[in-house]
């Protein structure tokens, strides 16, 4: 077939994606195709009018109506925009869920999950979560009379013991940021459901290419699109995916009422990013595995946190729950705090910066950067030491990355 055939003439295995401009079809589309194909086609059939292979950026705030209250599916761009619809369907398909919702940032997505709760409700959250998530829970929502128990959610007994009659949500990341702990999504979903609570999983570190929490029983999947899904460090965004129609309705109500929605340009950039998610993730995983193994052998490194290493305490669970182990590696250096700071400042290919998941490698010190909003005692109690280094391993040549780390270690620890 040629690119010029009409959609009806196509016989290339992508016909099943043609109707995917509505959320309801997303799951069926995902089931009908492999994730590599869904990443490129789900939610974005060629434009009917022009044949454009990328969804147009609908730079419009409003839409003409045929009569008062008679719109053509869109009335105002906070409420809905076709470029956003394409992204939401694409993300839903990748996660294997029926409904996607896109937001202006990962934090806006997480905030929308908390909007589902009522004053008096209780949340069990992992004690190793992104610092901004901790800040939102503790410093914003405690003032709205929600209460939070931060527990080591890899300890299922501890999670069971934290359940209260008013527990309404279990919130976890897996792998966690930055200690790379692996949470058992199926077991945590079961505990949540027995307590009458929702289980929400922040899947930012794994991405749907490596792990699909809805398959393991989670109710809501959350993403910072800023990371691997965008993939190029050029956009900030967030998303929620669920299979539950009623939850989706409620999330949509808050998405529209609060208004933290992404503009169509941001949606376009993420759609461009998700097309290459599978090929990028393969290289991220391969490079991270090599660096983790070599760091593990290096005399200046005390401990490596990477679920792909056989000695990782949850290596087997990770191997079951994930399709590969991801591109994030954390490690502790044997040197002093100053030497650690010197090390992260001395790398040249790895840029010293917050964030993760782009094609370029980044390195940071969580205690002073991404997790500085967590009080030091709580950080230490959760195992997040001042000497911890977190690397987002990019897709550069692995030997250039390793040479950079070796050189910076030698400089800092000489
Ligand atoms: O930055 P934003 O798009 O709002 O996403 C917040 C967020 C949510 N969940 C996880 C697991 C995250 O890692 C983040 C953002 N994290 C960083 C900026 C960071 O460097 O860890």
Image: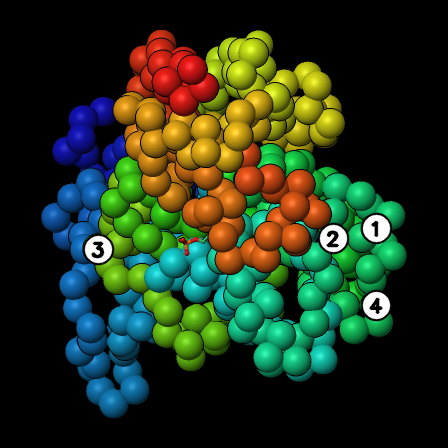
Pointer 2 or 1: first along the chain: 2
Disc 2 and disc 1 in contact, CB within 8 angstroms: yes
Q: Could you say which quadrant of the image residue 58 lies in?
A: bottom left
First along the sequence among labels 3 and 4: 4
Left or right of 380, for residue 411: left
- Report the residue marked by disc 4: 164
Mark 2, other Cα within 10 Å: few <14 / some 14–19 / many ≥20: some
The residue to which callout 2 is attached is 151
Label 3 sits on a secondary structure element that is: helix
Which quarter of the rendering shows the C terminus? top left
Q: Residue at x 54, y 11 (%)?
A: 298
**In this rendering, is residue 406 above or below 33?**
above
Mark 3 or 1: in front is 1
Residues packed near mark 1 inside 10 Å, few (<14), some (14 to 19) or many (20 plus): few
Residue 145 location in percent, x, y? 66, 80
User: Can you tell me whether the CB of the residue at mark 3 lies under 8 Å from the nearest atom of ligand 1?
Assistant: no
Q: Earlier in the sequence, mark 4 or mark 1?
A: 1
Residue at image mark 1: 158
Q: Residue at x 80, y 53 (%)?
A: 159
């Amino acid at each position: 077939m040629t690119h010029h055939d009409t959609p009806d003439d196509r016989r290339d295995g992508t016909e099943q994606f043609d109707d995917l401009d509505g959320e309801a079809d997303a799951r069926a589309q995902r089931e009908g195709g492999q994730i590599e194909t869904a990443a490129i086609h789900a939610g974005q059939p060629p434009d009917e009018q022009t044949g454009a292979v990328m969804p147009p950026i609908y730079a419009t705030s409003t839409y003409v109506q045929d009569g008062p209250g008679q719109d053509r599916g869109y009335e105002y761009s906070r409420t809905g925009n076709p470029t956003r619809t394409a992204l939401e369907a694409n993300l839903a398909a990748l996660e294997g869920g029926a409904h996607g919702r896109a937001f202006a940032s990962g934090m806006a997505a997480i905030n929308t999950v908390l909007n589902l709760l009522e004053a008096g409700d209780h949340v069990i959250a992992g004690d190793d979560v992104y610092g901004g998530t901790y800040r939102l829970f503790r410093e914003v929502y405690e003032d709205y009379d929600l209460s939070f128990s931060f527990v080591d959610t890899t300890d299922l007994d501890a999670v069971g013991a934290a359940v209260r009659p008013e527990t309404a949500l279990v919130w976890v990341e897996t792998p966690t940021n930055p200690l790379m702990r692996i949470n058992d999504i199926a077991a945590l979903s079961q505990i949540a459901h027995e307590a009458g609570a929702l289980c929400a999983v922040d899947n930012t570190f794994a991405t749907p290419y490596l792990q699909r929490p809805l398959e393991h029983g989670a109710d809501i999947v959350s993403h910072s699109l800023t990371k691997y899904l965008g993939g190029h460090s050029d956009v900030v965004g967030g998303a929620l995916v669920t299979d539950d129609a009623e939850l989706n309705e409620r999330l949509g109500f808050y998405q529209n009422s609060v208004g933290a929605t992404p503009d169509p340009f941001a949606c376009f950039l993420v759609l461009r990013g998700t097309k290459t998610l599978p090929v990028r993730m393969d290289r991220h995983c391969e490079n991270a595995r090599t660096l983790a193994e070599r760091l593990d052998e290096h005399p200046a490194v005390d401990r490596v946190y990477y679920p792909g290493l056989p000695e990782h305490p949850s290596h087997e669970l990770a191997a079951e729950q994930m399709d590969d182990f991801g591109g994030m590696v954390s490690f502790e250096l044997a040197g002093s705090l100053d030497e650690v700071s010197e090390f992260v400042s001395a790398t040249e290919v790895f840029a010293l910066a917050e964030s993760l998941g782009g094609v370029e490698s980044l390195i940071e010190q969580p205690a002073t950067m991404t997790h500085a909003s967590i009080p030091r005692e709580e950080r230490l109690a959760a195992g997040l030491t001042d000497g911890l280094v977190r690397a987002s391993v990019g897709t550069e040549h692995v030997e250039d990355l390793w040479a950079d780390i070796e050189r910076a270690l030698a400089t800092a620890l000489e």
